[in-house]
Amino acid sequence: MAEILSINKSDKRGTVKYPCESGELIENTGLKGDAHADGSHRQLSLLAKESYDKMEALGSGKLPFGSFAENITTSGIILHTLPVGTVLKIGNCTVQVTQIGKECHNGCEIQKKVGKCVMPLEGIFARIINGGEINVGDTIEIV
């Protein structure tokens, strides 16, 4: 079963995000209170715990969720294998995958420390089709 392990947000771009127990997804905008909630095609970012495990195996040490600036950290679903256009039900909300991966910002801190960053290949982005409240522990399903 796929689920939300962490919901993360920050009020400034270019910084790590900090976990919270719940959040509100706003249709066609993003996660309420997050600096990236701007209505672009990258309204919501997701990264799997399995990607964190890869980084830790490469020597990054234990990294707190939100370290890669993802809004939602998941478990039980290999996100980067989902094709663009995939629709996910997250709790009672619906999102659609719009992008797989992203360019790293001039060699992020993790990349400098470990020599590799997972967001360029394994982070995904989505637009919010139906918003609402999400909570740590909510299930994630492919629609």
Image (cartoon, grey):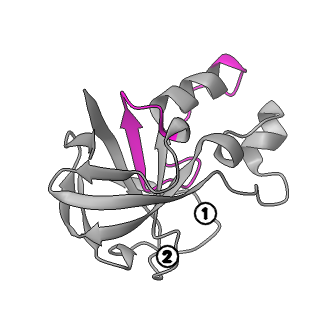
Residue type, numbered disc 1: Thr
x, y percentage for residue 116? 78, 35
Residue drawn 46% across the image and 70% down it: 43
Residue 58: say if magenta. Answer: yes
Quadrant in which the N terminus appears:
top left
Residue drawn 38% across the image and 38% down it: 74
Residue 49: say if magenta. Answer: no
- The residue that disc 1 covers is 15
Residue 129 placement: quadrant: bottom left
x, y percentage for residue 3? 27, 36
Residue 133 placement: quadrant: bottom left
Q: Decide which of tag 2 and tag 1 comes sooner along the chain.
A: 1
Taking the image as shown, residue 72 lies to the left or right of residue 104, namely: left
- The residue that disc 2 covers is 35
In front of the other: 141 or 29: 141
Mark in the foreground, 2 or 1 = 2
Segment colored magenta:
57-79
